[in-house]
Image (cartoon, rainbow, N blue to C red):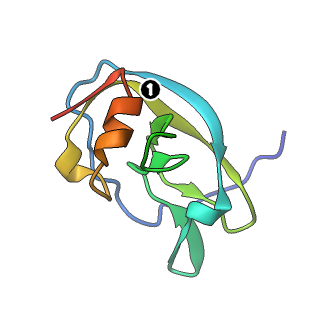
Amino acid sequence: MKVEQTTILRETVNFLKSEKFISASGAVPQSKGVAFEGRKIVKAGTILPSNDAQAKGILLEDVDVTAGDGFGAFLISGIVLAGRLPEVPQETAKTALKEIKFM
């Protein structure tokens, strides 16, 4: 297992309403990354794989995808503050994320 030292690029906004949630891990596509201080980052709170009926979860922490696809933890059940997410959830995404309540 390769261990790398990382640097926190920015503070993440807490979008969780409750401390009780369920998460699962999965792939984070490089195509969702945005440029930030010379790196390509997928922001915490991003609905993946897309903000539509294909939504599977909400990324819990920033993931650096500069070198290619990354790996991260996704919220699959819980309560979130929708106004704190980096983009407004589409109604189709909310429907697809049945176990997540948006407030």
102 sits to left or right of 65: left
8 sits to left or right of 11: right
Residue drawn at the location 54% of the way across and 36% of the way down: 73
Residue 8 versus residue 44 in the image, above or below: below
Name the residue beneath numbered marker 1: 76
Q: Position of residue 82 (x, y in %)?
A: 22, 44
Q: Position of residue 81 (x, y in %)?
A: 19, 40
Residue drawn at the location 35% of the way across and 41% of the way down: 92
Residue drawn at the location 38% of the way across and 48% of the way down: 45
Residue at the far bottom in the pictured view: 38
Q: Quadrant of the C terminus?
A: top left
Residue 36 versus residue 27 in the image, above or below: below
Write down the quadrant of residue 95 in the picture. top left
Residue 10 versus residue 96 in the image, above or below: below
Asked which secondary structure carries label 1, the reply is strand
11 sits to left or right of 82: right
Write down the quadrant of residue 10 in the picture. bottom left
Residue drawn at the location 50% of the way across and 50% of the way down: 50
Residue at the far right in the pictured view: 1
Using the image as rendered, state which of residue 100 and residue 66 is in the foreground.
100
Q: Position of residue 101 (x, y in %)?
A: 25, 27
Q: Residues within 10 Å of mark 1 (few under 14, many from 20)?
A: many
Question: Count of labels shown?
Answer: 1
Write down the quadrant of residue 22 in the picture. top left
Using the image as rendered, state which of residue 37 and residue 51 is in the foreground.
51
Q: Position of residue 77 (x, y in %)?
A: 38, 22
Task: Give amino acid for label 1.
Answer: Ile
Q: Quadrant of the N terminus?
A: top right
